[in-house]
Image: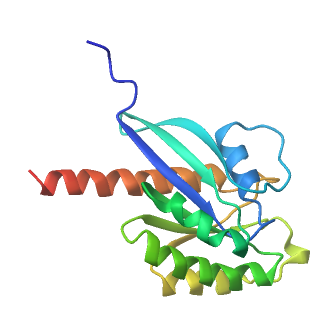
Amino acid sequence: MAKKEWDYTFKIILIGSQGVGKIDLMSHFADQDQMNNSAIGVDFKLEGIELDGKKIKLQIWDTAGQEKFQTISSSYFRGAKGIMFVYDVTNGKSLEDLALWIEHAAEQAKKTERIILGNNCESESARQVSKTEGEELAKKHGMRIFETSTKASLNVEKAFLTLAREIKEKMDRTEKNSL
């Protein structure tokens, strides 16, 4: 009998306006490669992690991010265990757009674990979204928030691992309650 390679597989989707750094976040965490340019359509990467002695495969999906792709991206909610909502702290409109993405996701993926990422926080002089504004949005929707930077390697891994841990803990509770 073949040994099981993974104890869990979690599909995580990154959602936010185009240009907020979703591809950079995904690449920084999943393969530490050079940062990418904006994508049209969908991209995904795989990353293996270990939490509490369990091997977990993360399927990290980057949706297009443009409103015109909103109906296309709804199919990517299927099977998702976690959602990272991403805005750019140097782009105020991206935070406004995030409220729409959160609303759309609430209809499509009710039982997913969710967090908010305020990306590009290293650009303090170009900041258009205060830390407080991001925190207020997260509080309103009952989510954690991390300010991240791929350039400064700040909180990227922590955000992914936190979301993965929350998914795993939820699955463990569900499994325990079903016994």
Q: Nearer the viewer, residue 172 or 132?
A: 172
Q: Residue furthest right?
A: 125
- Residue that appears at 58% across and 87% down: 136
Q: How many numbered markers are drawn?
A: 0
Taking the image as shown, residue 10 lies to the left or right of residue 125, namely left
- Residue that appears at 68% across and 53% down: 42
Q: Nearer the viewer, residue 102 or 70?
A: 70
Q: Nearer the viewer, residue 155 or 40?
A: 40
Give how far across and how far down residue 104 sits, in percent: 53, 78
Q: Residue furthest left?
A: 179
- Residue that appears at 49% across and 61% down: 77
- Residue that appears at 63% across and 71% down: 70
Q: Quadrant of residue 123?
A: bottom right
Give how far across and how far down residue 43 sits, in percent: 68, 48
Q: Is residue 12 above or below residue 66?
A: above
Taking the image as shown, residue 8 lies to the left or right of residue 74, namely left
Q: How is the image coloured?
A: rainbow
Q: Is residue 77 above or below residue 34?
A: below
Q: Quadrant of the N terminus?
A: top left
Give how far across and how far down residue 161 sits, in percent: 51, 50
Taking the image as shown, residue 23 lies to the left or right of residue 6, namely right
Q: Quadrant of residue 28?
A: top right
Taking the image as shown, residue 155 lies to the left or right of residue 59, namely right
Q: Nearer the viewer, residue 57 or 65?
A: 65
Give how far across and how far down residue 56 sits, in percent: 43, 38
Q: Is residue 9 above or below residue 158?
A: above
